[in-house]
Image (cartoon, rainbow, N blue to C red):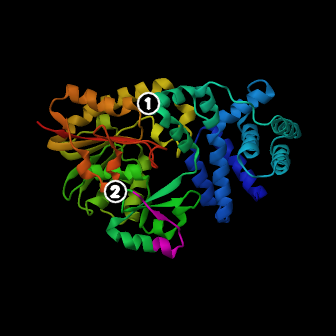
Amino acid sequence: MAYRKNIRKITVKSLKKVFEGKRPIGYVVDKVLSTNKDLDGKDRDLFTFLVYGTYKRVITIDWILRNIYGKKLYLDNELKAIIYLGVFEIFYSNIPEYATINELVEIAKRFISKKAGNFVNFILRRVIENGFPELPSDEIERASILYSHPTWLVRRWKKEVGDDYVKVLEANLKKKDIHLRLNSLKGINNCKMKLFEEDIKFKDSPYLSSSVRVEEGFDIFRSLAFKEGYVTVQDEASQLISHIVDPRKNEKILDTFAGRGNKTTHLLELSGNGAIVFSLDKNRNKLKDLKENVKRLSLKMPEIINEKLENFKVDFKFDKILFDAPCTGLGTVRRKPEILSRIRKEDIKRSASNIMRLLNIVKNMVRIGGSIIYSVCSFEKEEGEDIIKSFLSKNRNFDMDNISIYLPEKAKIFIRKKFFYTIPGVDDVDGFFASRLIRLC
């Protein structure tokens, strides 16, 4: 595996930023790829592999260093980036060990100090001499180290999904495909032709006729297909949520946490640009991105509201409300591995409590006969079916709709216990939960 020195330096700088915790890893990687336009395809792939790979293996690398050094290492973020990258390369890449040590020692000496370079040399040589430590015999601890996930979460997923828990852990470590939503208003075949013209290799989605997959590492945001509004980057599970909404022309639809507008724009596309969408979000910068995405896709501008849901008031009722609730995000770890560094066991219960509070606000905004489409990017029971069961037990004027009739035929496999459930690794998409609630009176 070839490795240019400037790629190594960029990788160390990027990991330092990620370890500082100020920006998510996806933002850091995308920023580097968009500003270093001279990088060829192989360099971009290698950079993405090393940054994501190292960060996703932090728990494993912590354990390796603790076993070899005899105690936990407390390092500043720059030195941590260099050493952790080195350990990742030694055990998880085909890069020659001598190149790893020589070049990382040089970077440490040049950008930190000679003493730091000597320390990097000492640690990495010890890592090579000792090899990969013997794994513990306990199944949960072994899986935690092998797949770099917190032990409490490994134990939890084993209980929730049984033997499939290993598939979830493996999926979170693997290289991810990029899912592209094709702009149906421009014509599905026209969108694919645009990708062909730019020599962008893709494969059709197994679940959606309006979606394709490209390999991670390709900067789709630089393509004309993206810039001219033929495609949008969005996981297929997330795309299916808008199908469950089933937006129609002239319907008033509230998108409660609209963010940068992936679902808002999809609702407009699916309704033939005819739905009256209200996009609500408290983050002004995200709403600026939403406006740009609407323009890029040549869609009708929705009603944009920069407000917290708790403070939002209208003098009418909505036909449909997409309540894509803020949650732990544990279904998207493979795309956002920083979730594992901040999530705590108690956060799941706290998230569920907040979701229920917000759902009790939303329920008063939908008309009789209208629908609330509830979704989260999580497959945790407390954030999914427990929310729906609890809500229905206390709100007899609502009932569950049959979501099967809204899903494409090939996506009906995701219906579990009458809910929409996707599980990473078990299903080759992100983890999502959704249910559709009808207001009866």
Q: Upstream in the sequence, badge 2 or badge 1?
A: 1
The x and y percentages for residue 153 are 52, 29
Left or right: 149, with 309 as reference point? right
Residue toward you, 321 or 163: 163
The x and y percentages for residue 364 are 20, 35
Left or right: 109, with 148 as reference point? right
The x and y percentages for residue 263 are 35, 52
Residue sitting at x 30%, y 55%: 409
Above or below for 272 versus 283:
below
Q: Quadrant of residue 191?
A: bottom left
Q: Which residue is mark 2?
A: 266
Residue toward you, 222 or 49: 49
Residue sitting at x 26%, y 48%: 404
Query: What kind of element bears circle 1?
Result: helix
Q: Specify the quadrant that holds the C terminus.
A: top left
Residue sitting at x 41%, y 25%: 349
Residue toward you, 2 or 104: 2
The residue furthest left is 441
Left or right: 284, with 214 as reference point? left
Query: Residue 196 in magenta?
Result: yes
Residue sitting at x 50%, y 56%: 178
The x and y percentages for residue 149 are 58, 33
Q: Which residues are magenta?
A: 194-206
Q: Specify the quadrant that holds the N terminus.
A: bottom right
Res 359 visible:
yes
Query: Residue 368 in magenta?
Result: no
Left or right: 261, with 408 as reference point? right
The dot on residue 160 is 1
Q: Amino acid at mark 1?
A: Glu
Res 316 visible:
no
Q: Amino acid at mark 2?
A: His
At label 1, counting other C-alpha atoms closer than 10 Å, the crowd grade (few under 14, some 14-19, many 20 or more) is some
